[in-house]
Image (spheres, helix red, strand yellow):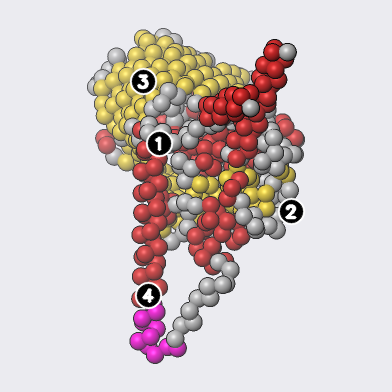
Amino acid sequence: MRTKTLLIRLVFCLTSLVCIRVAAAQANDVAVVVNDHNSVTKMSKAELRKIFAGEERSWAAGVPIRVFVRAPGTHERGALLKLLGMTENEYKQYWTSQVFRGEARAEPSTLPSNGMQREALAAFPGAVALVSIEDVKPGMKVLRVEGRMPGEAGYALN
Amino acid sequence: MRHITWTATVLLLLSSLCYPQDTTSTDPETIRQLVQQVNDLQERVKLLESQKKEFQQKESQQNHAGASTPTPPDPLAPPVESADQTASAPTVAQETRQVHGIQWRGFGEVDYKALNRRAPELGTYGFVPGSQANFYSGDFGLFLTSRLTDKASVLSEIVFEEADAQSYRLDLRRLLLKYDYNDHLKMSFGRYQTNIGYYNWAFRSAAWLQTTADRPLVMEFATNGGLLPTQAIGVSLTGSVPSGKLGLNYVAEYGSSDTVRPDLTGDRKVTDENNGNQVNVGFFLRPDPIPGLQIGASYYHDKISDFVQGPSLRYGQTIVNGYIVYVAHGIEFLNEGFLIRDAALHFSNAVFNTPAFYSQISKQFGHIRPFFRYQYVNASSNNLIYDDVGLRYGPSFGARYDLNEYVAFKAQLDHNVRRDEPDLNGLQLQLAFTF
């Protein structure tokens, strides 16, 4: 009887642990947001990486993609670097190279706040940005990544 | 009751242990990033204040001129205009590199090279014959781009290159009118750097972008004794091909070049190839499952002549290239192979094959990136176009140290084995920078 009680307690503790872990991870999720009029609803992680690496530069409808990113040190920037597999220094060198190669016209615009990102999304039909889940506001269209919305278990970007 | 208390205590303890802690730490990198953020915000405030002043000045001018009182902005109106202003003004750093819509960037280098032989070799810029060690300044490049429309832009690269006796020659390395119809069709018209291989595409002509202090000989610019036609004037098309996870891209170029390459021996002879119109087609793959991997191949064809033998002696020149490159997670692994085939078109059936390859590996550790490169070129002694090149092979190793985002210091040791010539050992030191 004593062993059984202990076992139940252990299972309860472990389940709680997992739940807390999942909840914490979901709170850290970063949403991929686009202009409200963009017809895209989902994308794969590979497509996302290509867009933020400047390898894909237009949406399927032909509208040029405008990438907006947050400043170094922010949670969204961390998620971006994780997505690209680069350090901050490598990211800067990469974009200098891309511009110099003629593969990109300029480094993606860096905005100092998510409020500004929201304004940019509203202003540019081809805009795309990464926004922390808690900063997602009405007017931002959130895309599914690998079939999952931010906050769902197994979401790819955090 | 006792059990509930016990469970609650354990849960509380475990939760506090396993809940992700605030990642804020006091390590130098975090502090640096926070300082950078503060600086960015300060600059942003300055920018907004200056815009406000301009607005106030305009307003007072209008009032003085007796103009009607300007309508105060509607606080309930959607922030579309301000959003446009904000979004089209990227970072302050980007703004300072933009004058009247023209974005600019500069690249430069200062080098010191020492050899164990007094016989000069070209490809070393202002290297003085008879001296074993010299300073020189390599290429100084100004890179300008301007956006014309959402899809059209102009790109130019102006290079001041050190020549003999510390004189400088001006070279318009690239001048392109670009039109990106979509991801599948991007067109460029003007003077371009040929997409033969990966190196020419990836590093263009800025030493700062390269890991090593110099380019592999086969990829060196023709004006510095390199073997390939690195530049042409014409049309270049690139784009992606719908291919799913394969990530297939194509390159097609048609243009005219007129390659003049000085002999590597430093005898001041030059080979003017009097090229015809060149065709270059290629493809490369960037497979989705392995980000950073690029596999490509290209086929180039042209008709050239050796000026010494007379322009009537024409060769059909075919250059086949293949490469496998991996650049990700701080690793750079470049492998390229070439076969240059020169076949006489008149008076003889002579065919000369010149194989060449290089392999380069480096890994970033913090600010330092040690590298190793091995290169090989084997030109026939009877090949009149590359008679100065012969057989050359050997390793290079060294390290690149990034002092900051803009300046890199490189140190490189070279060992070069040459056919019928003594081995050549060299030390190269370079300060490469961008601004």
- Is the residue at mark 3 from the same chain as the one at mark 2? no
- Between residues B295 and B377, which one lies in front from this camera angle? B295
**As shown in the figure, which amino acid type bears the numbered disc 2?**
Ser
Q: Are marks 2 and 1 in contact (CB under 8 Å)?
A: no
Tag 1 or tag 4, which sits nearer the N-term? Answer: 1
**Of the two numbered discs 3 and 2 in the rendering, the one whose residue sits closer to the viewer:** 2
Q: Are marks 4 and 1 in contact (CB under 8 Å)?
A: no
User: Please, what secondary structure does the residue beneath circle 4 have?
Assistant: helix
Q: Is residue B155 left or right of residue B428?
A: right
Q: How many marks?
A: 4
Residue at 33%, 17% in the rendered image: B426
User: Please, what secondary structure does the residue beneath circle 3 have?
Assistant: strand
- Between residues B164 and A150, which one lies in front from this camera angle? A150
**As shown in the figure, which amino acid type bears the numbered disc 4?**
Gln
* Magenta range: B58-68
Dot 4 falls on which chain? B
Label 2 to label 1: alpha-carbon separation: 38 Å
Q: Is residue A61 visible?
A: yes
**As shown in the figure, which amino acid type bears the numbered disc 1?**
Thr
Residue at 40%, 46% in the rendered image: B37
- Is the residue at mark 3 from the same chain as the one at mark 4? yes
Q: Quadrant of residue B36?
A: top left
Give the residue pinned by disc 2.
Answer: A39
Q: Is residue B29 visible?
A: no
